[in-house]
Image (cartoon, coloured by chain):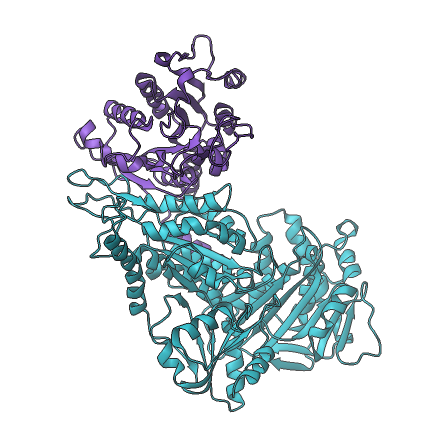
């Protein structure tokens, strides 16, 4: 067998704009790493990329998939159906063949999969992946390395840049033993040099991007949030492990020390939020986070943070609820919780990131809002964005970075933390107050100095103070941007990770001559001031979201928007099957709801 | 180089009883907590920390009103979570003197889990549990330290659950300073507070503080002028670094002994986290925050 990859012969070549490749195997097969390599390669080739993966909720083993969509144009969703299915096992084939397009390529491990000969819907390509991998690597490796063998096959089929891939292997495996990198290359070469021509009569080639764009960064949503927080000046935080939030706390724990900060793994969610509030009170902008169940536990302390007017970032990587729910599936059912979850009238800020790139910018913005308005700020993301890899332009870090500062300058005599005339600016402990009267922070209703007050007039004033600053934030928001038709038949409204599928739906509908617009709301509390005016320009408004339509037939955002605008034209397209929206699902749902 | 550095403290005058007192306490006349507050003031007068560097924190309960009565930076947090709140303050700002005050409900019931973890993590702070064996703020319900047979509104025929043994709980938490005192013994209280404050680590003192309204006479057995015995630990006999001996003291019959049960120097979390930061920064050779960020993004290309 050739140890060096040889250039593919020139054969029939099909130029494609994008491809959806679904890899289906078991969780220990390393298919996530094929996906990650492809995603990184696409990013370095200035191609757009989006991945989608599911991991089983079991501790180890079990079926697992990774879907990567890469292409030259704008990639907005992970794709309804796959162009290519790689099936490692019979169960992978049986479970996923229905996701393959008719006429698509079914690449299967002929060591493990038997096909129904009479099925002619797909182009079937059988390769003895398991046995060839063992042959390439020698006896003791069992089937480990199948993933890289398969990556070799795909690289040949899609004429990917092998040199760039090898560099990525080197970066990934270079720090480990030489054997690992050598085996990776051996398995890759074996796949690359497999005579695929005998079974597949063409190669695919991505169109070169129109402009030679800058190399992009590729990362998943949780990494983007983490880096956004660090760029925004967060150096302290505390959390408790829960899927799918844990990767953020893991990364913060290992990253923050070199920035002079620290992240504490707390004994529980209540302690985690309390420690984060302690950091914030001590003058350090801090983060806590979790997923739904943990956020529920934090609610009392978050109410305190609103009352005491403490700046704080709270991340919720939503998963399927209620209760333990569907821990490894996606849902957007914590919107009301984020806005109203604490007892009492307890205003705070809620932002929702709409894609991986936006995870970075939303985290950054959350930091500046928390500081400016001295208030807890929620960042809502979800399971689908948490681990999905996308490529985007490297942010302008030099101009975006906020170096945290600790303001212990003396405060003048008569300093009041809860001055009714302005937004609260705390004097952290360690600050000398001229005249020697020190401030209190408290969850009791208080006067301007922070001392308890049950005075009816003062309570009303303080309630308004905490509300008014959120209104002030609403006044400062940029005008909402509608994509597509600025007026017309239908406006699709969404929030969070549904951005891509909704956008793709609108593009498709408009190419069919429909008058449709798309508005994705990033600011959920406060809502932008211009929504009512925008809604009035459309006959139908359909709010698309991944939560339950509840008792009255409307999803969570739809209910809020109806209450806000009293616009009876607002309809709801809500679902809770634990899966992201497909384009055809939205098209069909919209069709059923509009007049 | 990196952001979170702390400016040098500015010296400001001296701490006086007048300057350190804030609102007049809202406690009932005769409450043991008045004495705890007075002893705290006197201890601070003696120690003379810069006033702006003192932070007084609390959870919920009668005793947790404490911060309002002390003129320092202060925070009145939620029920049971004062320790993790104070942990954030202590780890965020190692230059501060962090004090936490609370009651038996806050410490041993709703916040019991946090006590175990703040103890084992050896957070640098001082915690005073003003134990009155009853829920006073909510007007006489059973507390985790109420003895069996105690008649309360939630146990009208007498408490049936075994009470928490405060000293045993504190010792097993991993706290590196565990003391016990009594609100009727001002001098002893002051010496306990001073030793706790001077201990570098998680120091906790249980202070029996009578609730004259809902559990009058609870601690008479330890008050000499009421015929009781206030027995102080003889540290020539008791090795405060010996956990087994300390646990044996904790098992003594009511009212037990007062003084330092346990004290041992162990690395604080503050020190250990500081070492991680120092190592990480030494490795990066003076790189700025922006350099670090750029390097991380370069890995994503």
Above-or-below relation of A545 to A255: below
| Residue A338: percent from left, percent from top | 45, 59
Question: Quick check: A334 above or below A255?
Answer: below
Give the number of marks: 0
Residue B110, how many percent across, how many down?
47, 38
* Colour chain B is painted in: purple
Q: From this viewpoint, is residue A157 visible? A: yes
Task: Name the residue: 54% across, 67% down.
Answer: A547
| Name of the residue lying farthest toward the front | B157
Q: From what the image shows, is residue B246 above or below residue A589?
A: above
Query: Could you tell me which residue is drawn at 37 percent across and 25 percent down?
Result: B210
Tint of chain A: cyan
| Quadrant in the picture for residue B235 | top left
Where residue A573 sits in the image (x, y, percent)? 54, 76
Left or right relative to B162: residue B29? left
Residue A569 or residue A246, whichever sits in front: A569
Q: Between B23 and A423, which is closer to the camera in this rendering?
A: B23
Residue toward you, A367 or A449: A449
Looking at the image, which residue sits at the far bottom? A513
Q: Is residue B286 visible?
A: no
Q: Compare residues A275 and A169 and report the one nearer the observer.
A: A275
Residue drawn at the location 73% of the way across and 71% of the way down: A107
In the displayed structure, does residue A158 sit left or right of residue A45?
Answer: right
């Amino acid at each position: 067998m050739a140890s060096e990859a040889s250039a593919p012969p020139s054969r029939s070549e099909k130029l494609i704009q994008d491809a959806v490749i679904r890899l289906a195997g078991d969780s220990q097969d390393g298919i996530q790493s094929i996906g990650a390599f492809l995603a990184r390669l696409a990013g370095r080739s200035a191609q757009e990329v989006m991945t989608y993966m599911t991991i089983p909720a079991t501790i180890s083993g079990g079926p697992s998939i990774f879907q990567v969509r890469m292409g030259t144009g704008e990639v907005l969703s992970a794709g309804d159906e796959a162009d290519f299915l790689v099936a490692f096992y019979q169960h992978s084939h049986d479970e996923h063949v229905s996701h393959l397009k008719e006429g698509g390529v079914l690449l299967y491990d002929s060591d493990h999969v038997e096909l129904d000969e009479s099925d002619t819907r797909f182009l079937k390509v059988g390769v003895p992946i398991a046995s060839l991998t063992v042959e390439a690597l020698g006896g003791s490796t069992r089937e480990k390395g199948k993933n890289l063998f398969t990556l070799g096959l795909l690289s040949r089929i899609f004429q990917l840049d092998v040199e760039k891939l090898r560099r990525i292997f080197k970066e990934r495996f270079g720090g480990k033993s030489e054997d690992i990198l050598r085996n990776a290359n051996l398995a890759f070469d074996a796949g690359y040099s497999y005579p695929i021509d005998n079974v597949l009569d063409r190669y695919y080639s991505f169109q070169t991007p129109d402009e030679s764009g800058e190399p992009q960064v590729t990362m998943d949503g949780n990494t983007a949030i983490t880096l956004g927080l660090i760029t925004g000046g967060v150096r302290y935080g505390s959390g408790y492990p829960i899927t799918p939030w844990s990767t953020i706390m893991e990364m913060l724990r290992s990253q923050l020390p070199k920035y002079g900060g620290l992240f504490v793994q707390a004994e529980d969610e209540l302690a985690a939020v309390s420690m984060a509030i302690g950091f914030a009170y001590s003058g350090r902008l801090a983060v806590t986070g979790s997923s739904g169940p943990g956020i529920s536990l934090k609610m009392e302390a978050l109410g305190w943070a609103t009352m005491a007017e403490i700046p704080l970032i709270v991340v919720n990587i939503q998963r399927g609820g209620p209760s333990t729910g569907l821990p490894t599936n996606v849902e957007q059912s914590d919107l009301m919780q984020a806005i109203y979850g604490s007892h009492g009238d307890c205003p705070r800020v809620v932002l929702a990131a709409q894609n991986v790139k936006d995870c970075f910018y939303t985290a950054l913005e959350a930091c500046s809002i928390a500081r400016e308005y001295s208030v807890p700020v929620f960042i809502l993301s979800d399971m689908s964005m948490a681990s999905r890899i996308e490529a985007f332009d490297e942010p302008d870090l030099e101009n975006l970075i906020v170096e945290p500062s600790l303001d212990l300058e003396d405060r003048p005599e008569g300093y009041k933390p809860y001055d009714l005339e302005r937004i609260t600016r705390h004097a952290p402990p360690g600050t000398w107050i001229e005249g020697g009267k020190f401030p209190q922070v408290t969850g009791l209703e208080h006067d301007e100095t922070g001392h308890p007050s049950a005075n009816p007039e003062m309570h009303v004033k303080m309630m308004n103070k905490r509300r008014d600053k959120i209104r002030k934030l609403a006044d400062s928001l940029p005008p909402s941007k509608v994509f597509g038709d600025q007026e017309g038949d239908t406006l699709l409204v969404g929030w969070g990770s549904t951005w891509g599928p909704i956008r793709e739906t609108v593009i498709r509908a408009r190419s069919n001559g429909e008058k449709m617009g798309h508005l994705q709301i990033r600011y959920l509390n406060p809502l932008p001031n211009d929504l009512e005016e925008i809604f009035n320009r459309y006959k139908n408004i359909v709010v698309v979201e991944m939560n339950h339509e509840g008792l009255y037939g409307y999803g969570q955002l739809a209910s809020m928007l109806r209450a806000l605008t009293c616009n009876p034209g607002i309809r709801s397209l809500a679902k809770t099957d634990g899966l992201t929206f497909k384009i055809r699902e939205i098209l069909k749902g919209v069709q059923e709801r509009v007049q | 180089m990196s952001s979170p550095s702390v400016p040098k403290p500015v010296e400001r005058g001296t701490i006086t009883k007048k300057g350190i007192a804030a609102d007049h306490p809202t406690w009932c006349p005769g409450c043991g907590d008045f004495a705890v507050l007075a002893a705290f003031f006197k201890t601070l007068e003696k120690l003379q920390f810069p006033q702006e560097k003192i932070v007084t924190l609390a959870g919920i309960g009668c005793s947790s009103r404490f911060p309002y009565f002390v003129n320092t930076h202060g925070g009145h947090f939620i029920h049971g979570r004062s320790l993790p709140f104070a942990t954030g303050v202590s780890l965020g700002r190692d230059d501060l003197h962090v004090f936490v005050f609370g009651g038996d409900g806050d410490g041993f019931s709703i916040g019991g889990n946090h006590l175990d973890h703040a103890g084992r993590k050896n957070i640098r702070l001082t915690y005073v549990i003003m134990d009155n064996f009853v829920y006073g703020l909510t007007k006489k319900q059973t507390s985790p330290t109420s003895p069996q047979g105690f008649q309360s509104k939630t146990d009208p025929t007498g408490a049936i659950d075994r009470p928490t043994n405060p000293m045993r709980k504190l010792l097993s938490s991993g706290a590196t300073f565990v003391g016990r005192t009594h609100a009727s013994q001002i001098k002893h209280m002051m010496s306990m507070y001073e030793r706790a404050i001077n201990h570098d680590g998680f120091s906790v003192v249980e202070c029996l503080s009578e609730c004259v309204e809902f559990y009058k006479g609870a601690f008479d057995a330890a008050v000499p002028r009421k015929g009781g015995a206030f027995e102080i630990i003889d540290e020539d006999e008791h090795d405060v670094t010996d956990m087994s001996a300390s646990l044996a003291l904790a098992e003594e019959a009511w009212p037990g002994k007062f003084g330092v049960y346990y004290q041992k120097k162990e690395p604080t979390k503050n020190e250990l986290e500081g070492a991680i930061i120092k190592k990480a920064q030494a490795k990066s050779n003076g790189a700025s925050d922006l350099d670090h960020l750029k390097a991380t993004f370069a890995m994503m290309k």
